Amino acid sequence: MSDRHFKFWPAHTTRTLVAPATNLYYNAEVSAHRYPDKPFLVFYDTAVTFAEFLDESQRIAGFLERRCAVRKGDRVLLLMQNSPQFVIGYYGILRANAVVVPLNPMNLTQEILRYAEDCGANTLIVSQELYSRVEPLLGNCALKSVIVAAYSDYLKRPTTLAVPDFISQPLAQFAGPGLTLWRDVLAAGLQPGPLTAGPDDLCVMPYTSGTTGVPKGCMHTHRTAMHTLVVGMRWFSIQPELTLMAVAPLFHVTGMQGGMNGPLYIGNTVVMLPRWDRNAAAECVQRYRISSWTAIPTMIQDFFANPDIAKFDLSSIRRLSGGGAAMPAAVAQRLLDMGVTYYEGYGLSETIGATHLNPPEHPKKQCLGVPIHDVDSRVVDPVTLAELPAGEVGEIVTHGPQVFLGYWNRPQESAEAFVEIDGKRFLRTGDLGRVDEEGYFFMVDRLKRMINAAGYKVWPTEVESLMYQHPAILEACVIGAKDAHRGETVKALIVLRPEWRDPIDAQQIIDWCRENMAAYKCPRIVEFVPALPKSGAGKIMWRALQDREAAVQTGEIST
């Protein structure tokens, strides 16, 4: 394990961490006893105090145990947008000694069925605007109990913020076998039995995005989850007095740890937005003096691209951080020019948050950062697994306390996800990267995303980063296209900034690329699109675009 990065280690924290050996729910109990009347969640100006949160999560747990027959270790599906009910439901499931299975709200009926069958869940908590996707499953699969919530139940105060229609919609009337309304669950006032789940019991099982195959459930214990939520708060010296904002989706590990579990552990107030809205986010920063939030780069880009951004007082912002995709260097520089530093990090669903973070005093742009507390990460040859010297590109492998146990009911794939090096069990990330002389890690691309153009290896992430330096480009995604002479060639799908939609054409973009990058990397094909497909976590879905291109080439679909 290299120790070069310790030269830049945050001065305020030790190099190792002893995380609490407790159930995550204990964090809720501690904060509720410390700060009973302090707002924990703020939802369109309606506050839920820590004491109210603890009480309602216990009522959810009591109902799950006594009416839904949820037992220790059972998996419970959670399907909704960022909301008080998501957080209360998440911790209610934990209080019932069960395992949270958070689902992407973009999932449709058959996908929900697949997750339910795969993890063996028979209980689901869902918001009312998504209930129509669940209704066909009742009585037709193992799903026996459903709790339906209306977000408007938590709009208890007037607000001048723009509330989306699906949030303000009054509670609809639902009926059916095994169906109970959220408000009726709370009104029942049922209390759960003892909290018996320990640090090594399963806690949460996020599913991988499926960009490289069928989604798989990542088994995390209270211990693995505890490590990254504590590190994330300690790394950036988050104090209880700071107000944070939750805009990254909570079903995804980035938002889950940075916007929910970590703040609950510290005792922060969290202002919530169910969907990204740059004007609402700016108003909340101004209104609540928000100091920090965790978000993916596309959200940060959009926030500061707001033509009205100068109208808001954003002086409370102390830091912005996130991961999920690399922040283009050109965009990071624009933020620096505005006095804002974006701290990048790196992690996977398999590590329930960060394995690498940029040191607060010594960040680098477009950099994954350095391995955090007790993490050993290396860059190795994907075939021989030999560690590579600084500067050489290989696969990132990582070992640490937050690495998952394996994939649910997939022993073969679990075994293939790990390798043993120097007597340690390392997770193969499938990401290609390099480490510099100072021990900082940099992403190159996904192992399976490389474009082979006439024998030259082209990494789409690198090309995208260069293209973001063009002032006309708002978003870019680079994929491979078939070429009769080169085998593959580089194709760029681009979303233009509104003010550039008329003055520029594809050839001008190609000409600019030829002036700013090696010829073999340059896109030979440029296609302007109104938008790029994104996952529920906000990541650009390059795999979907690559698959569509392949289908066009084979004639399966037309352009």
Image (cartoon, grey):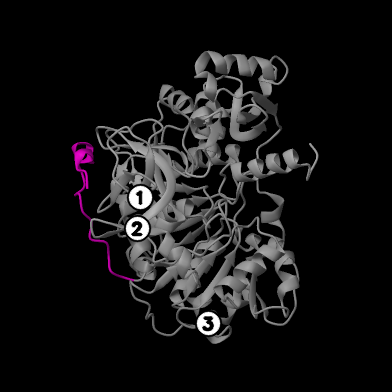
Alpha carbon distance from label 2 to label 1: 9 Å
Q: On the rendered structure, is 57 left or right of 81?
A: left
Choose between 189 and 470: the one closer to the eye: 470
Instruction: Indicate whether 543 appears above or below 123.
Output: above
Instruction: Indicate whether 153 appears above or below 471.
Output: below
Task: Give the residue type that dot 2 points to.
Answer: Val
Choose between 386 and 56: the one closer to the eye: 386
N-term-proximal mark, 1 vs 3: 3
Q: Is residue 313 magenta?
A: no
Residue at left offset 28%, top offset 34%: 390
Location of mark 3 (residue): 70
* Labelled disc at residue 397: 1
Task: Give the residue type that dot 1 points to.
Answer: Val
User: Magenta segment, which residues?
Assistant: 1-22
Q: Residues within 10 Å of mark 2 (few under 14, many from 20)?
A: some
Mark 3 and mark 2 in contact? Answer it, CB < 8 Å.
no
Instruction: Indicate whether 492 appears above or below 413.
Output: above
Q: Quadrant of the C terminus?
A: top right
